[in-house]
Structures are given as C-alpha cells and as structure tokens.
Amino acid sequence: MSTRFASPTSYRVAAIQYAPSLGEKEKNVADLLALVEEAAQHGARLIVLPEMCTTGYCWTTRAEIAPYVEPIPGPTTHRFQALASRYQCYIALGMPEVDTLTQVYYNAMVLLGPDGPVGTYRKMHSYMSEPRWARDGDGGVPVWETPLGRLGAMIGLDATYFETARLAALQEVDVLVCPTNWALEQHPTNWWMARAFENGIYLLVANREGNERGMHFYGGSCLLNPDGSIQAALETGSGILYGEVDLAHSREKRWGSEQEVYGNRLQDRRPREYISLVNNQYLWEPLRYHSLYELGELPQGQLSCVGFLQLGLSSFAASQASTTLETLQNLVRMCIRDNAPACPDILVLPELVLPGPVLLHPATQNPAKEFANHIRTQAIRVPGPETDALVALAQELQVSMVLGVAEHAQGNYYNTILLLDPHGIYGTYRKLHLTQRDRLWASPGNLGLSTFDTPSGRIGLATGYDVLFPETLRVLAGMGTDLVCAPAFLDFPAPVPVAATPGARTSFSFFMDEDGSQLHHLLWRVRAAEHNVYLALANWSQECVGGQANGMSGVFSPNYTNEVVADEDEPGLMMMTIDTREQRTGRRTTHMLDYAPGDMAGSLTGELAYNILDSIPGNVVRAKPMLRKRQPYWYLDIVKERQS
C-alpha cells in the first residue's frame, strides 16, 4: 500500500521523447522504464510517454501486431506501475491494447497512479493506418480526479478535432496529456497550441522521433500553457522535457489581451446554437447531401478574389473630418483605385465600421456608459439610408462587401454583420458570442448561424470573437460553407513565433519570413484548416482612445496551402484568390465523346458513366474531409447547457 501525498497546487511534469524500434518490445520497454525512472528521480509527478511507444507505430495488419498487444492492466503496465508506486507519480503510457472479451484491438493510453491504474483512454479519431488493425475508441473522453488535479487524455490525431479537448474542458480538466506519433511538422504544432488556448488548459505532449517504414517523426514534445504559449519544448532527439503546472492558471477561464479582458472561454459559449455539430452531415457524398429535397445544390463555385481592408483605429479617427460613413466610403474607393486593375470580388471590412468601435475623444467620468451611449446613439436601421449608401458604393465598384455595424431593431441593439452586393442587402448576421465590451450595449444575436449562396460560393458570416469558439465554424462548415467572412475588433490572440531550424524542411516552410523566423502559430490558420473552409478575417489595428487591436487580418486556406496575412500595424487592402469549384479543374466531367459514356462495355478508352453527385469532390473546400472523419456520436456534451 503506497502512502498518499498531499494534493499540490503546482508540480513538475515531464514528457518522454523516444524513438521506439518496430516490434522490439522488450528493448523499447526497458529503455522507457529507464527514462521514466530518471524523470521521476528529477521530481516529475506526471510523466507522459509517446503513443504506441512500447511497440512502434507503423503496423500493416492485425496479424502483424498481434504478438505485441496486451490487455490493460497486463504485464507491461505492471512494470510501469511499480515505478508509479515507488516514486509516488502518475504515468501516462501509450500502447496497443487487446480487449480480452472481444479480442478487438485499440490504440490506447493508460494512466497509472501510485495505487494502480486510474483509467484508460482509447483513441477516438484514427489516423489512416490504424483501421487496418484497431477499432476507434469506444469509451468517450474521460477525465480523472487525482491529487494532481483533473487529468484527461487524447492521442495523436485527436488533437486535430477540437471536440476531443473541448469535451475534456467541459469536465473541468486541468491538464490534458497527449501521447502522439506526429509526423506533420517539426515544432510544437498549431493544432496543439489551439487546443490549449481555446480551452485554457495545460497540454503535455509526448511525441516520438526518428524514422519508421518511410515515416519521419519530428519530435517537438512540449508543455503548452493555458494561453497556448510554449513553456518548454524538445525539438529533436530522444530525451526528457520538464515543465511546471500551476492549477490556478488552468482554472482561470477568462481570456483577452494584457489591456482588456474580453470574456470567458467556456461561459461565453452558446451551446443551443451548436446542436447541428452532433449530426454526421458529411457521412454521405456532400454534393448529393446538400442538394436533397428543395434545398438546391451548392453554388457551382468559381475562382474568386477575396480582399480584406485592415483599418487603423487612430488613422481612421484622424481622417474623420466628415461623417463616419463618408470616411468609410472614401477609404474603400481609394483602396480599390490604388490596387487597380486588381479588384476583389468580395471585400471584408472590420467589425463596427459604423459607427466606429471606440470613442473618438477621451471619456470623462464613466467610460463604459459613454461608450455604450456612443454606439447606441449612432446605431443604424437595417435597411436604412446608411445601407442604401453602402449598396450604392458596392454597385459603383462592382464588389460585394462584408462589414460590421451597430444595428437598432425593434428596441434592441445588435452587433451586426452585413453582406452587401450591388443589388442590396444579401445577408445579415447578429453576433452570438458577446465580449464584455459588447454586453455594455448589445443583445445576443437572434438569427442563428446562416449561409448565403453567391457566385463565389456559399458564404457564412461571423465576427472574430465568434471564430475564437471552434463550434461556430464547425456549424457553418456542416452547412457546406466555402468561405467564412469575419469582421473583427480584437487585440488577441497574438501570433507565436518559433525560430526555424537551419535547413529544416517542414510543411510550413511558406510561413517563413526573410529573417528565418515564423508566424508559427496563428489561430485563424487552424480555424480554416480544421473546418476545411476559407476564412477571411478583417481586424482593426493600432491604438486609439478607449481601445486597441492587433491586426493580423488575413485570408486563410482550407488545407494550410497558402495564406495572405497583414502585419499588426499594416493598414490597407490585401487580396488572395480562392477556388470554390467542385473539382480543382473546375470541370464537372471530362471532355465530350461522340458516344454515350458507358456505351462501350469494358472499354479501356471509353468514359465511365457516373453522376457527379455520387462522387467526393476533388476540392477540399467541397469535400471537407475533416468533417467526414469526425466521431459525432461522442460529442453530445458539447451542445448541453452548462449548469451554473
């Protein structure tokens, strides 16, 4: 019987980075036991090992891995359990598990404590090779109460699905451990940093390194802080990474910049608006699914130019010798003229461009009340003379525009996003997730999340703060959205630069700037890629009386392939081409033949007859593979209202 230790509020943790040898189980286990004992001797109370670390990862068949699977608990867990008991620590061990009742195999992790196994997590979202031998996890996302706080787990590819970590966060997890075999990039990845930031939790990641069956694993094991920043990282090689956990930090769910608290990561969620994310919308072929009954097909899509206009708060205020509307019209005209002949099909402007998001003069006695009065007294009716003028501008320039306004409707005030085209107001969205500043004057939106079909594709509307909640884009993506347009007024999150290793080749080499550093982590990049949508975000920049914003506007792609990003203090118009066609060639079929497809039975040269609706589109923004591989059966807690 072990002696229980007092529950600490802060403690040391460790992640083991190791290159297991495929099939050399005894060697791997012996090496790992030595590394775990070393970490424990150096004071680590929680120690995480990589995914499948006892056996290696790249197995081709069930028969091949069969000699190496074990039950949990079993012989291998008993050996690590002895160390947990001896050193009064907790060990998270990744290994292949066999269920002795069914003989089904799982990619699993067991958490071992001083008094025995605490619990097991079975990987929920399988990577490409794993269905050859393993079943998807069938136990949900458990969180375990321990003297070290509330501990949870995810494995490998689970990190690319926000739902895994969110389910743990909704159970008040403090530290999420992540054994992984990550082969996508060299540094602590954007995906991991997003999961820590959006949930306000510590994320302790143990990655393997080395080569196995043609796969190269980059290492990058790390401890991420609840704000998504990197506390410690081990870039390459085998070894032990150490860090410190302070439970007070992971239990503080407020977020924002150093100057302003914007709200609460969990309390500001709107679960009733997320209900559709528990539906498996992309189980069926997406083009047929979206064309059912009277819904009509997805718009055909095209190559389009999307632009964003990042406005500076101080320069915008200084230019207002005339009305805010006239200032806005002149700025848009000037930017379009200066960039001719290039011209956006869709132009996204920041949030609250009418009447402007901050006071134009110093507040006197009650800044909050004066700000609320400023917004409410200048809020507009929709439609109204201001929107008529903006529609006229869209017609003059032959562009569609997305912009934010303060709206007054039926006695209520809303932070509203408008989609305008040369013919009128085409789409309206009222902000659902309100910041503390919004709550001074606005009511939560009452129109839900909606999409609008245009020649450029299916467009969803949101604000930057809405996009911070991953559920928002998941719902819009499930509706078939190609492009999310998000006007913003935010001073966070900040990008996280990471120095590049000289000569390193990573999948993010195109984010390198001239001095060799990277915009390594930018949350908007993850938001676009994890939902397979284009994201066009237009933020304010600079500092002004009563507020500031950090810029970083951009257009982000659905699969990390390219992006255009403005600097923090870089006002002006920037543009990027997006492709929303169903196939990358933009053609629904191949060239026409002088006979009907399929007429020549068994022909090697004839064109096969098929219906485009029964195929998976070749364009990732239409195929949405990230949605197709979800496990929505387990996501129900995400749409439940939290009990206060």
Image (spheres, rainbow, N blue to C red):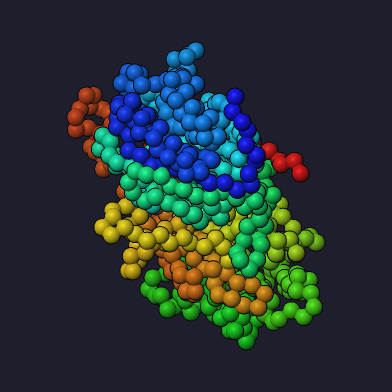
Q: Is residue 492 visible?
A: yes
Where residue 499 appears, as percent x and y from the top left, is 37, 61
The image quadrant where one finds the C terminus is top right
Q: Is residue 197 visible?
A: no
Where residue 407 appears, as percent x and y from the top left, is 70, 64
- Residue 48's place in the image compared with 353, above or below, is above
**Farthest top residue?**
101
Based on the displayed image, in which of its 4 quarters is residue 502 positioned?
bottom left
- Residue 258's place in the image compared with 212, above or below, is below
Q: Residue at x 69, y 49 (%)?
A: 267
In the image, is 437 to the left or to the right of 420? right
Q: Residue at x 44, y 15 (%)?
A: 103
- Residue 128's place in the image compared with 620, above or below, is above
Q: Residue at x 71, y 81 (%)?
A: 362
Where residue 152 appears, as percent x and y from the top left, is 56, 37
- Residue 419's place in the image compared with 226, above or below, is below
Pick the front one: 164 or 220? 220
In the image, is 208 to the left or to the right of 409? left
The image quadrant where one finds the N terminus is top right
Q: Residue at x 32, y 52 (%)?
A: 506
Pick the front one: 265 or 116? 116
